[in-house]
Amino acid sequence: MVALPSADLKSLVDAARQGDRAALDDLVRATYGGTYTLAYRLTGNEDDARDVVQDAYLRAYRGLRRFRGDSQFTTWLYRITANCSANLLAKRARTRTEALSEDDPVVDIRPDSDPEQRMAGEDERARVVSALGILPWRLRQVIVLRDIYDLPHGSIASELGISEAAAKVRLHRARRRLRELLAADFGDGMGDSEESWDARAS
Amino acid sequence: MRGLAEIVRLRTGECREAVDAIAQIAAEEPDVDEKAAAHVTQCLRCQAEVAAYRRIVRHLRAMRHEGISPPVGSLAAVLAVLEAAAVEQNVASTTWVVRAAYVGGITVATAAAGAAGVMVWMSRRRLGLADTG
């Protein structure tokens, strides 16, 4: 799956909109890697990512004629993917008897969370990926969409079905939790819980 | 005069209030709370935190360009789903065309029959008038 220049992608989109099946297949092949990566980052597992991607491409196919081309095709597709992911995860959470709340403490399930067991010079990137993976899904989604994919707050809000103000509040909360999880790797400053702040202040 | 402990407590409170602004500054976002931003410029501890968070943001942004390999067969599955959807759509549109043609045919036939009826009625009427005249 090689990323195509945007002009090539546009011509594929135009042809696919006219009903060219081969162009549609090429369009899917050209964008599949990126879409799957986003779906995986949003859902945190392979099975859900597959479901989300399938749903996203089906919706994109059915809505292709409505794509006005005033944004990049990949941005449009990523928004659909975010929406499909939010729907799937919300549905899952509703069916679970014990859904993890955003405010529940995040348990660090990484086997090497003990600083003594951690190897010196461990890859920071790997730690960030790992911390992101254990964030509650609602918080993970806003970090992925904002800090990785640089989507505007308004788009995030609309795809997650919440207000823009709520999206911003959720992002602040998510960043705090992420920072907390990475305290051992990036210094233990502001990421501390309120309890430890209070303890330090007194 | 404030004691050192009180000053430290106040400063810590300000730092805590600046937590969200620190992430925004590190991510170079607009609309940072002015009071918090002003505090950060004067607080070494908060500036260190901005630097630490900036490293996290850098890693997050770099993730955009790192692909995760999809499982084998998942692309083929999506293409098959799209193929099925296309076939379904074609069948639906073909059915629609057949229905439209059927309804159109009935309409045309009805209109033709009506026109023929009118013509017959008019010619009979004309003949009737001629007989009486």
Image: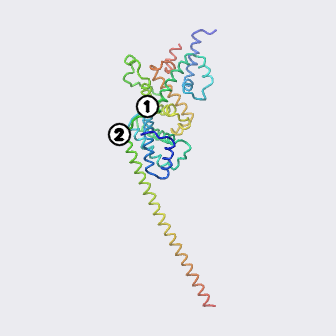
Q: Is residue A149 above or below residue A70?
A: above
Along the horizontal axis of the image, is B133 left or right of A152? right
Check whether the beta carbons of the residues at disc 2 and disc 1 lie within 8 A of each other.
no
Return the x and y of residue A76 as percentages of the image width and height.
Answer: 51, 42
Q: Determine the chain carrying the residue at label 2.
A: B
Q: Determine the chain carrying the residue at label 1.
A: A
Of residues A156 and B14, the one nearer the viewer is A156
The amino acid pointed to by label 2 is Val
Q: CA distance from mark 2 to mark 1?
A: 31 Å
In the rendered image, which quarter is residue A136 located in?
top left
Of residues B29 and A200, the one nearer the viewer is B29
Return the x and y of residue B31 as percentages of the image width and height.
Answer: 61, 29
Q: Residues within 10 Å of mark 1 (few under 14, many from 20)?
A: some
Question: At 49% across and 69% down in the image, what residue appears?
Answer: B105
Q: Residues within 10 Å of mark 2 (few under 14, many from 20)?
A: few
Query: Looking at the image, how many numbered discs can be counted on the residues?
Result: 2
Q: Quadrant of the N terminus of chain A?
A: top left
Task: Between label 2 and label 1, give the one nearer the viewer.
Answer: 2
Q: Residues at marks 2 and 1, common chain?
A: no
The amino acid pointed to by label 1 is Leu
Q: Is residue B8 above or below residue A71?
A: above
Return the x and y of residue B44 as percentages of the image width and height.
Answer: 56, 16
Along the horizontal axis of the image, is A106 left or right of B119? left
Residue named by callout 1: A100
Q: How is the structure coloured here?
A: rainbow
Return the x and y of residue B8 as percentages of the image width and height.
Answer: 57, 12
Mark 2 element type: loop
Residue named by callout 2: B72
Of residues B38 and B133, the one nearer the viewer is B38
